[in-house]
Amino acid sequence: MKIAVASDHRGIKAVEQIKATVAELDHEYIDLGCCNDHPVDYPDVAYLAAEAVSSGKVDRAVLVCGTGIGMSIAANKVKGVRAALCFDELNAKISRQHNDANVLCMSGDLLGNTMLRKMVETWLTTEFLGGRHKRRVSKIAAIEEGKDPRTVTD
């Protein structure tokens, strides 16, 4: 898989760990920034990564900011993106199994290197279960199109 990795200034150290983990799992990554500790507006970085997912340039993305909240909110504004804010391995696993999350958002301030590594490993190796969850993801896509999700039957 090809993975976009990006952060604001509060996630730089975490992103280095994430890039190493992605590479160790034999995935390709592209680093979309930022590259120093000068303040960066997280919506700018989130958009770059989310757009890369939406357009198919990458398969998935991992985003880090101070809490992960801002990145998650911003990324979810891009069509076709299902960004999940996760704080542990179980969140990461379920975000893939049940929600087919294509963007993982994490906190650079609250998570240590060991947890970051475990979460990224889990998220990248967990498959979407489909089944009843496929219908629910289709309903999310319907909302994105301005439609009533109750009209989705598949």
Image (spheres, helix red, strand yellow):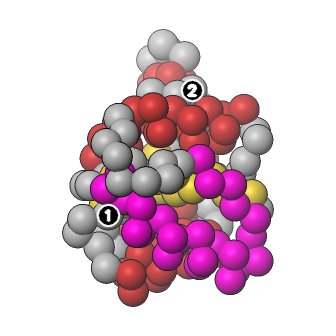
Does residue 54 belong to the magenta stretch? Answer: no
Seen as rendered, the residue at the extreme top is 146
Could you tell me residue 113's position as x and y percent? Answer: 39, 81
Q: Residue at x 37, y 59 (%)?
A: 11
Badge 2 density bin: few <14, some 14–19, many ≥20, Cα 10 Å: some
Q: Estimate the x, y position of residue 15 in percent, counting from the top left.
A: 48, 65
Up/down of 144 relative to 48, above or below? above
Q: Position of residue 129 (x, y in %)?
A: 61, 63
Q: Residue 29 magenta-drawn?
A: yes
**Badge 1 element:** loop
Q: Is residue 152 visible?
A: no
Q: Do the CB atoms of the residues marked 1 and 2 lie less than 8 Å apart?
A: no
Q: Identify which amino acid the numbered label 1 is placed on.
A: Gly
**In the image, what residue type sits under mark 2?**
Lys
Which quadrant would the C terminus be assigned to in this image?
A: top right
Above or below residue 79? Residue 34 is below
Residue under the image location 41 percent in, 69 percent down = 14
Q: Is residue 25 above or below residue 99?
A: below
- Viewer-side residue, 33 vs 78: 33
Determine whether the residue tagged by mark 2 lies in a helix, strand or loop: loop
Location of the N terminus (image quadrant): bottom right
User: Which residue in the protein does label 2 denote?
Assistant: 79
Q: CA distance from mark 1 to mark 2?
A: 25 Å
Corner quadrant of residue 131: bottom right
At horizontal 24% and vertical 65% (from top left) the residue drawn is: 109
Range drawn in magenta: 9-32
Q: Main secondary structure of the magenta part?
A: helix
Q: Which mark is residue 108?
A: 1
Left or right of 9 in this view: 146: right
Q: Nearer the viewer, residue 112 or 40?
A: 40
User: Which residue is nearer to you in this view: 11 or 123?
Assistant: 11
